[in-house]
Image: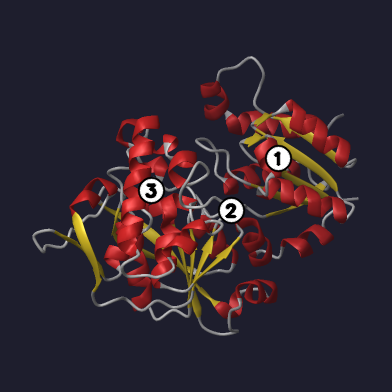
């Protein structure tokens, strides 16, 4: 009897995209006719793949647009535009959307992504979210009924100042000139902020799993600044500059102090904080969004086996990441579950397999090989592991 499998993977960073992991699993299991029928759902937390995954799921269209990358160079990005009538009832209820109209989907990582920069180019003093504002402004011209912005994987730490610049705010220096590319290294020159002709945006929803506040030890700079090119001293210095910019923003907005402490205000260098000052912004967890958008609860009910995974399965996976949330949902539905991850933390494996009796966790990155080999040959390693586990005889 053919068993129904749901393959729902998150990405393997620097190696395989979520869609590639899902397709490899589907092709491997269906290669032996009659044993498995595989349905696939690539996962995204709002970072790389967000536009592709969501737009493809509901048969939307992709619109190209040239925007500024995090260093000010123009690059082509793809915007997803989807008919609301193609969305599931679950997704429309979750996002509080009407039955008819269109929604635009934007991926911050594709505009100002950290992965686009060479290691030596990563410097949060110099990067700006200006391009994100440009894309938002373009979406406003498309007469959309809603915009969905995924903010994972950014290279910026500018509190959304760059995006606000593109949406109509002016950051004025002491000579009265507007700063054209306001990255943090230019903030010392800003003497005042003024609102020009502000772009009117449709309702904006931000997909984000990060819950950190804007400032402090758990804030944007101290938690994520290192990966964006800041050493300890630079992080301290940028934190002070952010406090100064926050005070300057307080001359225009009365609720900056409260907003800076809000859960998620430190995500993606504070992009949601900045946009939330000027616009009404709704934050949603990345997994809850993808779950409703793809109607994952129904897919789990219909499957016999769930297969999920990601690049590394460790204790951070248990803090709301998509594969772990799928494990919980599959357990509730009484489904056999497998995790295939590039690397697995042994302690987390023991905890999860003890708590969920029908769960098995496997590391497909081969032992005794280099990290470079694991990343380069991840496809063959996954296929080999799938064959060993799913076709044991």
Quick one: label 2, few (<14), some, or many (20+) residues within 10 Å?
Answer: many
**Does residue 4 show up?**
no
The nearer-to-camera label among 3 and 2 is 3
Picture residue at 64% right of the left edge, 14% below the top:
368
Query: Can you identify the residue that label 1 sits on?
Result: 28
* Residue 268 seen in the figure: yes
Rendering coords of residue 56 (x, y %) = 55, 62
Q: Which residue is mark 3?
A: 157
Q: Is residue 82 above or below residue 370?
A: below
Quadrant (top left, top right, bottom left, bottom right) of the C terminus: top right
Tell me residue 302's x, y (percent).
Answer: 83, 61
Percent position (x, y) of residue 211?
Answer: 57, 52
Direction top: furthest residue: 368
Mark found first going from the N terminus, 3 or 2: 3
Give the mark, 2 or 1, whose residue is nearer the N terminus. 1
- Could you tell me how far apart the alpha carbons at marks 3 and 2 are, in whole angstroms? 17 Å
Q: Is residue 184 above or below residue 261?
A: above
Residue 281, percent from left and from top? 49, 70
Name the residue nearer the viewer: 24 or 11: 11
Q: CA distance from mark 2 to mark 1?
A: 31 Å
Which residue in the structure is indicated by mark 2?
A: 209
| Quadrant of the rendered image containing residue 131 | bottom left
Q: Which numbered disc, 3 or 1, marks the residue closer to the eye? A: 3
């Amino acid at each position: 009897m053919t068993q129904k499998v749901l393959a729902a993977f998150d990405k393997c960073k620097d190696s395989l995209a979520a869609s590639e992991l899902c397709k490899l699993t589907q092709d491997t299991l269906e290669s032996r006719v009659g044993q498995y029928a595989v349905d696939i759902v690539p996962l995204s937390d709002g970072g790389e793949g967000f536009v592709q995954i969501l737009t493809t799921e509901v048969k939307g269209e992709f619109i190209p647009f040239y925007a500024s990358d995090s260093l000010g160079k123009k690059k082509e990005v793809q915007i997803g535009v989807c008919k609301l009538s193609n969305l599931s009832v679950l997704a429309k209820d979750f996002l509080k959307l009407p039955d008819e109209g269109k929604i635009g989907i934007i991926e911050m990582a594709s505009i100002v992504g950290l992965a686009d920069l060479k290691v030596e180019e990563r410097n949060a003093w110099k990067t700006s979210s200006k391009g994100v504002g440009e894309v938002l402004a373009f979406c406003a011209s498309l007469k959309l009924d809603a915009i969905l912005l995924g903010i994972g994987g950014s290279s910026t730490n500018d509190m959304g100042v760059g995006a606000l610049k593109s949406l109509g705010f002016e950051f004025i220096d002491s000579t009265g000139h507007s700063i054209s590319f306001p990255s943090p290294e230019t903030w010392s020159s800003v003497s005042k902020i003024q609102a020009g002709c502000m772009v009117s945006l449709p309702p904006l929803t931000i997909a984000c799993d990060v819950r950190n506040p804007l400032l402090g030890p758990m804030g944007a700079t101290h938690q994520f600044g290192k990966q964006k090119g800041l050493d300890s001293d630079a992080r301290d210095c940028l934190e002070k500059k952010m406090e100064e910019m926050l005070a300057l923003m307080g001359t225009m907005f009365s609720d900056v102090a409260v907003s800076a402490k809000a859960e998620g205000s430190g995500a993606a260098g504070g992009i949601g904080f900045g946009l939330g000052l000027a616009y009404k912004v709704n934050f949603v967890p990345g997994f809850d969004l993808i779950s409703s958008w793809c109607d994952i609860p129904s897919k789990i009910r219909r499957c016999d086996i769930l297969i999920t995974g990601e690049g590394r399965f460790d204790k951070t996976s248990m803090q709301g990441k998509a594969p772990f949330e799928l494990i919980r949902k599959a357990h509730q539905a009484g489904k056999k579950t497998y995790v295939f991850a590039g690397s697995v933390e042994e302690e987390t494996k023991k905890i999860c397999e003890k708590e969920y009796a029908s769960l098995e966790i496997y590391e497909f990155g081969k032992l005794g090989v280099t990290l470079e080999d694991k990343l380069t040959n991840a496809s063959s390693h996954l296929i080999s592991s799938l064959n060993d586990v799913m076709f044991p005889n």
